[in-house]
Image (spheres, rainbow, N blue to C red):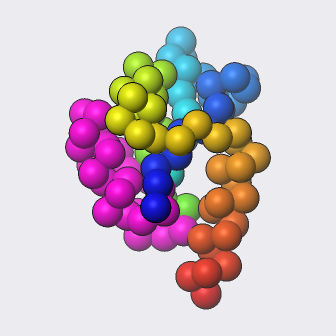
Amino acid sequence: MAVYVDDMHKHPMGQFGRMKMCHMIADTTEELIAMADMIGVSRKWIQHPNSPNEHFDIAMSKRVIAVRNGAVEITMRECALKTMQRRKSST
């Protein structure tokens, strides 16, 4: 089981104003919430809760902290593949 952060910040769509962002996903909701709590991201910012698409959009400063705390760095493509796998296993 793991938490993952992608490289969306390298793409134009990874910008929110001047802030660069990335996705944070996990194998389980519990892991995702635990990491959000650990890195100081409010639970209210979860997107698509309780679905295969659940994730947080996090700033690069939070990404650094997540990686320091065990998050695995993946590409946007790998993130999409993991999300598709979760979708298939939830049906």
Q: In this view, does 65 lie to the left or right of 13?
A: left
Residue drawn at (39%, 29%) of the image: 68
Q: In this view, does 40 lie to the left or right of 81?
A: left
Position above or below: 63 against 23? above
Q: Quadrant of residue 14?
A: top right
The image quadrant where one finds the C terminus is bottom right
Count of marks overlaid on the render? 0
Q: Quadrant of residue 63?
A: top left
Q: Position of residue 8 (x, y in %)?
A: 65, 32
Q: Is residue 74 left or right of residue 29?
A: right
Residue situated in front as seen by the camera: 79 or 51: 79
Chain part drawn in magenta: 26-52
Residue 42 lies in the magenta stretch: yes
Residue drawn at (73%, 26%) of the image: 11
Residue situated in front as seen by the camera: 26 or 51: 26
Q: Where is residue 50 in the image (x, y as percent from the top left)?
A: 41, 70
Position above or below: 41 against 3? above
Residue drawn at (65%, 50%) of the image: 79
Residue situated in front as seen by the camera: 58 or 44: 58
Q: Can residue 16 be seen in this view?
A: no
Residue drawn at (37%, 64%) of the image: 29
Q: Where is residue 58 in the image (x, y as percent from the top left)?
A: 44, 33
Q: Quadrant of residue 84?
A: bottom right
Q: Position of residue 77 (x, y in %)?
A: 75, 46
Q: Which residue lies furthest to the bottom in this view?
A: 91
Q: Which residue lies furthest to the top in this view?
A: 18
Q: Is residue 64 visible?
A: yes
